[in-house]
Image: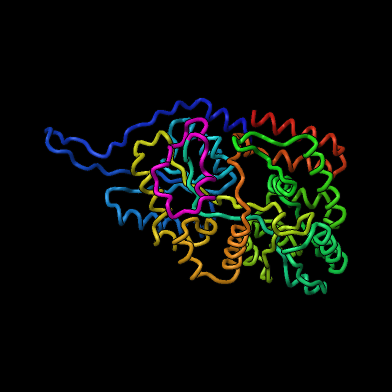
Amino acid sequence: MKRNKITTGLGIVIVGLMAATGCSSDAEGGEDTQEDVSLRFAWWGSDTRHQATQEIIDLFEEENPGITVEAQFGEWSNYWDQIATQTAGGNAPDIIQMDEMYVREYADRNALLDLSDVDTSELEDAAVDAGRTEDGLYAISLGVIALGTIVNADLLDEAGIDMPDDESWTWDDFAEISAQVSSDLDGVYGAGELVGAPMGLQVWLRQHDKDLFDDSGELALSTDDARDYLQFTLDLHEDADYPSADYISESQGLGPEDSAVGTNEAAMGFRWATQVIAQTSASGSDLQVLRLPSEEGSAEANGDWIKGSMFLSAAAGTDHPEEAKQFIDFFVNSQEAGEINGMERGLPANLEIRQSVLEEIEGPELAAAEFVEEVEQSGAGTTPVPPPGFGTFQEIIDRHLLELLFDRMTVDEAAEGMVAELEAEVS
């Protein structure tokens, strides 16, 4: 969605923290009686996620009589428009499934409740830090993910190519494999999608010991760095024999099932590791998750990081802050809730729940979980919480990449235009 819609919507919100109304006097001034509390919980996702989440809600209501949770769910495409509109109107859901790109957008405008007193003692540090700003903890991650290279082992075998060693492969190795697949297999590309924005830019920067943001969440991208990244992407597009600019343009924004790897149109692609689950189901192929290539040929230098997958936040204006935090605590720390949620929102951030989930999963779910754990153990770390405006970065970066691929801009023009727009969004 466009940044100006969020900014306009949230900019007019005057948020006041209200005390929870958990009890009241009866008509004759007698003893206080407990009131029923109703919470609204908004999230996006697939039917599978909706069903699992409703099971968790039912379990919470069973264990907490007097609190009901009303479900508000939909698709990603219109979710943030709805949340922005409701927040602007002072009618935000009590509990909001939050994404990293919008944490600071809402927190900096005092639209989120500080969750510092929710128990995070069993959560790994990366999951907690991902929702923390300088002012407090405004989102708690239910899981963690990492970026991976999804590789179709069946297509590589058909092309007579060995599975690459992801401990040591380089971008040159990636390009060579991709070009060979495109040459040897009819109707199949070696790679069907660029390293998606803004992740691709972040990976490239981190491979050069830089980052997209500084610790305070400010943009740290220079025009020179943008120019080098765009030239790298342009060269990779040619060397790896990627499909046409038209194909890439039409493929942008597709879900994992409809992606080139998910439809067996490409042997390799870049996705969050947990998306291999949906891609495997859609393709019917043997898909494996490998580490990202690097310039040096070193797994430790591939720029990957641990990212909070999906967060829970509470609206600052909720009439029931304690009950909202109680529900979030339950979702994050209940063993039963964690087992119901499984890998649906990433590798569980709660380490106790994670262990029980790992014992129950297999196939692509287990492969994704093990990959994320490997990235964690490599000391990949996290990235700073993005600044307001981050939600627009994907559209801006992708648009300038396409201008390059369609040969409508020079690298210098694309770099200058891209950085100018990114700076305008975060300023």
Q: Which residues make up the magenta segment?
A: 107-135
Q: Position of residue 333 (x, y in %)?
A: 41, 55
Please count the marks in the image.
0
Please check the rendered image and state whether residue 267 is part of the magenta-colored stretch, yes or no: no
Q: Is residue 277 left or right of residue 397?
A: left
- Is residue 22 shown above or below 57? above
Q: Is residue 43 visible?
A: no
Q: Is residue 393 visible?
A: yes
Magenta stretch, main secondary structure class? loop
Q: Position of residue 80 (x, y in %)?
A: 55, 40
Residue at 13% x, 38% y: name it: 31
| Quarter placement of the C terminus | top right
Q: Is residue 412 left or right of residue 53?
A: right
Colour scheme of this structure image? Answer: rainbow
Depth check, front residue: 12 or 314 = 314
Q: Is residue 317 left or right of residue 98?
A: left
Residue at 61% x, 55% y: name it: 379
Residue 408 image-quadrant placement: top right
Residue at 11% x, 33% y: name it: 28
Residue 374 image-quadrant placement: bottom right
Q: Position of residue 257 (x, y in %)?
A: 65, 60
Depth check, front residue: 345 or 92 = 345
Residue at 42% x, 56% y: name it: 54
Please check the rendered image and state whether residue 109 is part of the magenta-colored stretch, yes or no: yes
Q: Is residue 125 left or right of residue 276?
A: left
Q: Position of residue 32 (x, y in %)?
A: 17, 38
- Is residue 419 shown above or below 62? above
